[in-house]
Amino acid sequence: METPDHVMKTLLVGGAGYVGSACLRWLLKHGHDAIAYDSLLAGNAAAVPADRLVLGDLADRDLLNQTMAEHRVEAVMHFAALASVPESIQQPETYYRTNVLGTKNVLDAMVQNQVDRIVFSSTAATYGFENEMPLTEQSRQDPQVPYGRTKLAAEHMILDYARAHGLGCGLLRYFNASGADPDGEFGEDRQHETHLIPLVLQTAVGGREKFLVFGGDWETRDGTCVRDYVHTEDLAQAHQLAIEAAEPGFARAYNLGTGNGTTVFEVIQACEEVVGRKLAYEVVDSRPGDPAVLVASSEKIKKELAWKPQFAEIRQIAETAWKWHQNYPRGYADKLSSTT
Ligand SMILES: NC(=O)c1ccc[n+]([C@@H]2O[C@H](COP(=O)([O-])OP(=O)(O)OC[C@H]3O[C@@H](n4cnc5c(N)ncnc54)[C@H](O)[C@@H]3O)[C@@H](O)[C@H]2O)c1
């Protein structure tokens, strides 16, 4: 990608998380200036350069304001959220506070500091279950779980602020974020992991005895759920394109996926191939709030912003993730101990 004419200073709220930290590294590599603002509730300090992390919570309006002012922030990427579907069903209050009120705090600080570009991490979970696949941006948004409803509420709020205050905004609806830094130095590491690929590969490096497969009798080709796995490097490229496009008045939503639907068993097979052996799992009941199939059409961002995803195959995604898990079996804890 070309280096931008103007070095834009972007604040990545939630920038020490899995997707946010990949975007921060990408922006720095591609001629942007960027810092992360993160409470480290779920993120990792070692995922971002120490001098580029402001430790702070979404609830801290003063610190958000002060950070935007002191760092002369010109654009915001907003990743910070709680993102577990089952947890959102049990604790909707926490999800509305973080994902909706937290987004309002970010927007208020932007308005106060005349920051006029935002790219927001939205999700496939904002779509209804009755839509035909692949999902386009025209598919009906009718989220079936509190997590998706908080994300849709945040989308609407951003659009309303954008209209009222002349902001430019990109709403990026990711499907299943996956993969790791191609050098194997950074990757997925959460205290409470719920994502399939890290669970499978943690089993491979001995961090777990087995992993669970939720539901084996879905109406799909092998009975397991079909998802669209999109690499964090490709998400990062899309964030750069969207923030550069987000001139005041720009207001677009884009799906981000590869368009390839992959079943849970196919993901396991790809992981077993890169690992070189069979891995232990158990098929258990499906979870509330999970649809059978989620696949994206990302034609709109390809056409409008010339997005060119590089990791179309699940095998490539599994290879990068395996490199990270092999290098750092206990994730960032191992990375820290290898540098001290
Ligand atoms: N991972 C996926 O497959 C996926 C899919 C669709 C959408 N998304 C969205 O993308 C975004 C990033 O996802 P991720 O997988 O990187 O998650 P993540 O949990 O790794 O990152 C979220 C970051 O936000 C921070 N954070 C949470 N609450 C905060 C608060 N109150 N104040 C400050 N920081 C806070 C966390 O510490 C963490 O670093 C989320 O908004 C999520 O809803 C993710």
Image: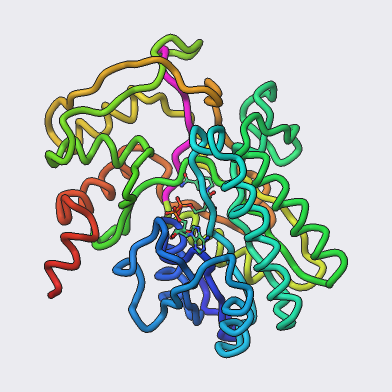
Region rendered in magenta: 223-231
299 relative position to 228: left or right? right
For image coordinates 59% across by 44% down, the residue present is 123
- Where residue 112 appears, as percent x and y from the top left, is 74, 80
Tell me the quarter of the image containing the C terminus.
bottom left
336 relative position to 318: left or right? left
Q: 276 above or below 102? A: above
For image coordinates 36% across by 71% down, the residue present is 48
Q: Is residue 225 magenta?
A: yes
- Where residue 252 appears, as percent x and y from the top left, is 74, 55
Q: Is residue 65 magenta?
A: no
Scheme by which the image is coloured: rainbow
- Where residue 135 appears, as percent x and y from the top left, is 65, 33
Count numbered badges in the picture: 0
- Where residue 181 appears, as percent x and y from the top left, is 32, 59
Q: 101 above or below 211? A: below
Q: Nearer the viewer, residue 278 or 49?
A: 49
For image coordinates 31% across by 38% down, the residue present is 315
Q: 208 above or below 22? A: above
For image coordinates 26% across by 34% down, the residue present is 200
325 relative position to 298: left or right? left
Q: Nearer the viewer, residue 295 or 67?
A: 67
Residue at the limit of the structure toward the right, as seen here: 164
| Snapshot quadrant of residue 197 | top left
